[in-house]
Image (cartoon, rainbow, N blue to C red):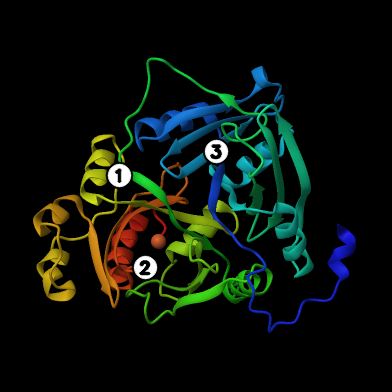
């Protein structure tokens, strides 16, 4: 494998997709207490707990729960021993995302092609096997301590992957709340590092730059950031990359970098087909969202034109709307979902729009700044 690192890069004129990706396979979180995290995702977000690995399955150093809602798979992992790498990750970063795993048809090729183009290998290709077949997986590094695992599951018919067993509780089946798939995952990187990772996704994974935002698009009186959205060939994987820009006070990206102790995943956007229902359910289950001032809704229809949803219901829930040439989108952002002001969620419903809510950035950032001020960051 390592021999292939020194091979020359392929001609850059090649237009073929050397890294076909079927979608997000799973997102793995390293957390302090996987069991309690599983309860949170089940009870607050409507995920079903379906898989488990731990002492009873022969996993002596880590415990994981697999939670699922429609196409979204989260793996929640915590350390059983202080010398587990999961413990070291958690000590530094707190609860956070370790792995955005990508579903591919050929994990070995995905690994070799990306490493040949300059990716740092983390786990060489390995075959995991049980009575349900085979999984091939391999991992490369991205920003900070975050990795991408390529997962090949075409020869596997089991629940998730070898090592996991079904987890059942006859008394507890949280009702799904309409979350359907991962729309995008946003990374925060350090000052001046955005283009390095834009180039990484471009040169090493063959992604294209979909949209760019500079500090003129994304700034308030106090804070600013820059962002570029990278997308794979079929558009199923979208990774916006943020870096802080100079502002009068500490930006939300800098606050994240301080508390996460380095680059990492800032937010995961989860798609729904009925955002009014989904957000109502989340609120009823105790999930907190950023508040925008009610004045946002005074000029909403003027700004976005006719929409299907009643504006008063959107205002009650604090849901934001933006329009682009293809349609419109509805979105809302949770507060951070762990003690540190790091990872949060976006709930998004797309009605044609393929953009990211640029028209909402200002209102949104001012809402975040009010939260930052309460944390003593501003
Ligand atoms: Fe987003």
Where disc 1 sits, the SS reads loop
Whether residue 115 is visible here, answered yes or no, is yes
Q: CA distance from mark 3 to mark 2?
A: 26 Å
Instruction: Return the residue nearer the eye: 336 or 324.
Output: 324
Q: CA distance from mark 2 to mark 1?
A: 21 Å
At a point 77% along the width and 44% down the height, the residue shown is 126
User: Compared with residue 139, is residue 204 higher up or lower down, i.e. above or below?
Assistant: below
Q: Which residue is mark 2?
A: 356
On-image quarter of the N terminus? bottom right
Residue 75's mark?
3
At a point 48% along the width and 34% down the height, the residue shown is 67
Q: Residues within 10 Å of mark 2 (few under 14, many from 20)?
A: many
Is the C-beta separation of discs 3 and 2 under 8 Å?
no
Q: CA distance from mark 1 to mark 3?
A: 22 Å
Q: Is mark 2 within 8 Å of ligand 1?
A: yes
Q: Which residue is mark 1?
A: 288
Where disc 3 sits, the SS reads strand
At a point 79% along the width and 76% down the height, the residue shown is 9
Q: Splitting the image into 4 quarters, where does residue 11 fall?
A: bottom right
On-image quarter of the C terminus? bottom left
User: Compared with residue 366, is residue 159 higher up or lower down, i.e. above or below?
Assistant: above
Q: Residues within 10 Å of mark 3 (few under 14, many from 20)?
A: many
């Amino acid at each position: 494998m390592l021999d292939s690192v020194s091979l020359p890069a392929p001609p850059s004129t090649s237009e073929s997709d050397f890294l076909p990706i079927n979608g997000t396979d799973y997102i793995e979180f390293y957390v302090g207490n996987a069991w309690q995290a599983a309860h949170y995702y089940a009870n607050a977000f409507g995920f079903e707990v379906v898989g488990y690995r731990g002492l009873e399955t022969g996993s002596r150093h880590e415990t994981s729960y697999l939670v699922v809602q429609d196409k979204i798979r989260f793996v929640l992992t915590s350390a059983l021993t202080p010398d587990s790498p999961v413990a070291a990750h958690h000590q530094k970063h707190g609860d956070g995302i370790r792995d955005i795993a990508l579903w591919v048809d050929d994990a070995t090729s995905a690994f070799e092609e990306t490493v040949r183009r300059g990716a740092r290998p983390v786990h060489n290709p390995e075959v995991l096997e049980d009575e349900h077949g085979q999984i091939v997986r391999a991992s490369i590094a991205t920003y900070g301590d975050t990795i991408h695992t390529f997962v090949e599951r075409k020869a596997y018919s089991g629940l998730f992957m070898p090592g996991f067993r079904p987890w059942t509780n006859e008394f507890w089946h949280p009702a799904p709340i309409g979350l359907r798939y991962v729309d995008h995952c946003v990374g925060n990187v350090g000052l001046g590092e955005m283009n390095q990772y834009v180039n990484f996704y471009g040169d090493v994974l063959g992604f294209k730059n979909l949209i760019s935002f500079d500090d003129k698009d994304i700034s308030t009186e106090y804070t600013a950031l820059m962002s570029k959205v990278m997308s794979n060939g079929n558009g199923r994987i979208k990774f916006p990359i943020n870096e802080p820009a100079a502002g009068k006070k500490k930006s939300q990206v800098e606050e994240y970098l301080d508390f996460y102790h380095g680059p990492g995943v800032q937010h995961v956007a989860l798609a729904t087909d009925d955002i009014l229902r989904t957000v109502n359910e989340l609120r009823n289950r105790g999930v907190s969202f950023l508040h925008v001032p009610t004045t946002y809704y005074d000029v909403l229809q003027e700004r976005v034109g006719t929409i299907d949803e009643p504006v008063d219901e959107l205002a009650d829930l604090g849901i934001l709307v933006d329009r682009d040439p293809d349609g419109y989108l509805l979105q809302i952002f949770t507060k951070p979902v762990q003690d540190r002001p790091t990872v949060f969620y976006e709930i998004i419903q797309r009605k044609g729009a393929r953009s990211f809510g640029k028209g909402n950035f200002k209102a949104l950032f001012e809402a975040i700044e009010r939260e930052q001020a309460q944390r003593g960051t501003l």
